[in-house]
């Protein structure tokens, strides 16, 4: 018998009350043998961009075939589509189609996408409520798919990959000795900020570990941070409290304070209006 | 061989240090094959009412036979009873008998209750300490029960269901076009407040989705919120930042701010002194 | 076939983003059948003392052979050693050798320690980044060890137990009717403070439950808390809001406020400069 896929969940529910527990209970009631993992349940509320980024960040490290359920769903109970996407590298994502597939579509590719047929793949017992699709629709449908109760085709009708709702993706500009991108996400724990500049290209354009760079961060076009910052392999190459540019875990250029919180200290955040420029 | 029950845990311990980990280690030492799930470990400190509510909220979604361990235990090490309850719908709850069974007793029914015999079902190695019964008594006893090392009868002596310690349950009043209840719990993550008014009866008394209602929330009898609020199927039916009455995940009437936090914005909380009235 | 060891993880990563998820994905990709548990992911940032304490607090409750992965790693990507220690009581710890083995070395004993050979036991695919050894080195190596892909000897070369990096351990002084130690850690959730005074010796020197003690807490030699405090078996033996000395879950003398937070109320913390003295 083929091994059943693992189910990974990410949401903006937190673990503060019984929501995640109820959602997982539904999964185990569908099929007791399914294996469930937490992605993160602390995605910022309603932030479908971050949901998209966390899928892109984590999914590839899991075994092929793993099914990720992502529920950041400000439009729950309205007309937004509920879908299951199949990525070109062999994973499934069960999610509201509201931007959560942005990075996977751009960088990995979506092979096929299907709208969940609620007449079949929705929990019957809770039909009277419309506000908890993590439990009643996404979790339930994912469990049925993982458990082999339905095939991927039985999720519901396919629709065009071109119709997937996506956020705009910003393209960095990388030239000889000069790179400009956006701060596209943060590490909310350590306060590091991650740009969209791929290190491979950065190194090809003449940047080297050990360089002292001019780093400028702008918000809405206005400079809010400007400093000489070393580009190093890790935090420990600079003194505690000093800023450092480094290669992050996704092979992008990032910025941090060694044993400190760059984001808090310099009041810098992420998003399309936060640009970063690095110069040799 | 019969499948072993799943163990679900909820506490007010948080995951900040090694307590939950130690408790789960005891379970796996009793029986390596047992399956453990987190309910929530963020129940407000010492709040046995919330413990009771979270059991009521989540348990029913799990497979019959699942054993829930609930440890919100301000009286640990004193004379309060430690018990295992068997519910009328086929679940087990291992808990201090301190109010945590309130909702299950009222809405589901307790079929039988037994006091844990500490001379048999307590971890020997830690006999010198009296303050961590989650690890030393509740978790250990639950693991023995789940692992089939003891039967339910071997938990300890049964006592009368009438002796179970319960909080007062408030009964809502629902009339034609007018309903009054309490805000009995919140969603601490999104800041929604959940009343004790069942939607089924609410709809029977003439309320309909699309109605604009007069909503009054009182604290200790004094009005703290009064507004015209639409009753809708989900948050997205009103504009961002506007209040909405809706049917929550437990089929009760609840109130929220669309993409906002009602509890924080209007400084409203839950408990027996927080009433809500809705009028057509 | 021998059962595979359980993997327990503790870090200072939190669960706020995709780091823990990526780390666990690597483990499941190495061997789908491995069982993973969370210790805590909320160790204070860069605090290798707390990492050490949490291992000491929790590990012993798990089945012998369990592999703990501890990643509090301010020196990631620098010359600090990455190691796997084998304790005298039969557990394995995969960790940067940066103080995280302090308590296990002092109280349990380390039988053998090996430096991880990165040429074999590091994830290849992520070779270009040096800042996430939880995922790329510690988690990956631990999964290979747990899965039986490598033996303990194949982790890498052994080195002398004497070379293990440790923090200073403070020795308490316990005399007849008088005991002095440090507050060596806290319960960050309930705000209790745990001393390094073993209860067994404390009781041998004439202290008894029911005693009213003079408790003095000093910070940097200066008294910051001085009060008459009962020594009791649990919190419930004193009134709500009152301080109590008690035997904690590790059989050490600790201090708390009943249903309150001693640490916050009295602005007391832990560390080598925080001493506590108890007198009959």
Image (cartoon, coloured by chain):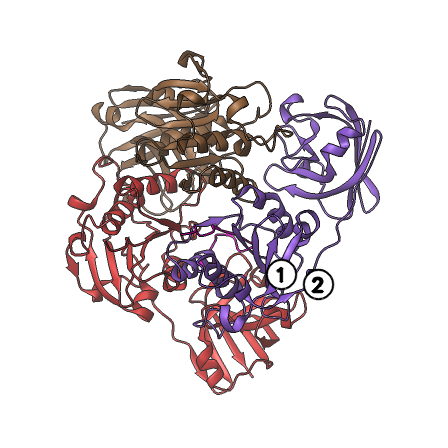
Chain colours: A red, B brown, C purple
User: Same subunit under labels 2 and 1?
Assistant: yes
Q: Chain of mark 1?
A: C
Residue B223 seen in render: no
- Number of other residues with Cα within 10 Å of mark 1, as a class: few under 14, some 14 to 19, many 20 or more: many
Residue A27 on the magenta segment: no
Mark 1 falls on what kind of element? Answer: strand
Q: Are marks 2 and 1 in contact (CB under 8 Å)?
A: yes
Residue C133 position in % (x across, y down): 53, 65
In this rendered view, identify the residue nearer to me: A31 or B225.
A31
| Residue sitting nearer the eye, A157 or C76 | C76
Q: Which mark is residue C163?
A: 2
The quadrant where residue C235 appears: top right
Q: Position of residue C4 (x, y in %)?
A: 44, 52
Say if the magenta span includes residue C12.
yes
Image vertical order of residue B202 relative to residue B190, above or below: above
Residue A264: percent from the left, percent from the top?
58, 59
Residue B58: image tag: none
């Amino acid at each position: 018998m083929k091994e059943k896929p693992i189910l990974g969940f990410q949401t903006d529910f937190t673990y503060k009350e019984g929501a995640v527990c109820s959602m997982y209970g539904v999964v185990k009631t569908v099929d007791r043998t399914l294996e469930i993992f937490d992605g993160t349940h602390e995605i910022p509320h309603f932030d479908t961009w971050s949901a998209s980024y966390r899928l892109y960040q984590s999914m590839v490290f899991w075994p092929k075939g793993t099914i990720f359920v992502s529920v950041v769903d400000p439009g729950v109970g309205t007309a937004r589509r509920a879908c299951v996407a199949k990525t070109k590298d062999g994973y499934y994502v069960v999610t509201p189609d509201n931007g959560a597939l942005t990075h996977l579509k751009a960088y990995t590719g979506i092979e096929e996408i299907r709208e969940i047929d609620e007449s079949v793949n929705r929990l019957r017992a809770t039909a009277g409520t419309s506000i908890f699709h993590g439990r009643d629709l996404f979790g339930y449908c994912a469990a049925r798919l993982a458990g082999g109760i339905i095939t991927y085709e039985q999720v519901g009708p396919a629709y065009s990959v071109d119709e997937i709702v996506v956020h705009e993706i910003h393209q960095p500009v990388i030239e000889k000795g000069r790179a400009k991108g956006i701060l596209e996400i943060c590490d909310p724990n350590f306060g590091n900020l991650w740009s969209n500049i791929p290190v491979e290209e950065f190194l090809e354009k003449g940047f080297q570990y050990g360089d002292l760079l001019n780093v400028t961060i702008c918000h809405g076009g206005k400079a809010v941070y400007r400093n000489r910052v070393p580009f190093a392999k890790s935090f420990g190459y600079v003194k505690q409290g000093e800023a450092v540019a480094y290669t992050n875990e996704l092979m992008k250029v990032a910025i941090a304070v060694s044993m400190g919180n760059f984001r808090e200290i310099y009041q810098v955040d992420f998003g399309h209006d936060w640009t970063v420029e690095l110069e040799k």
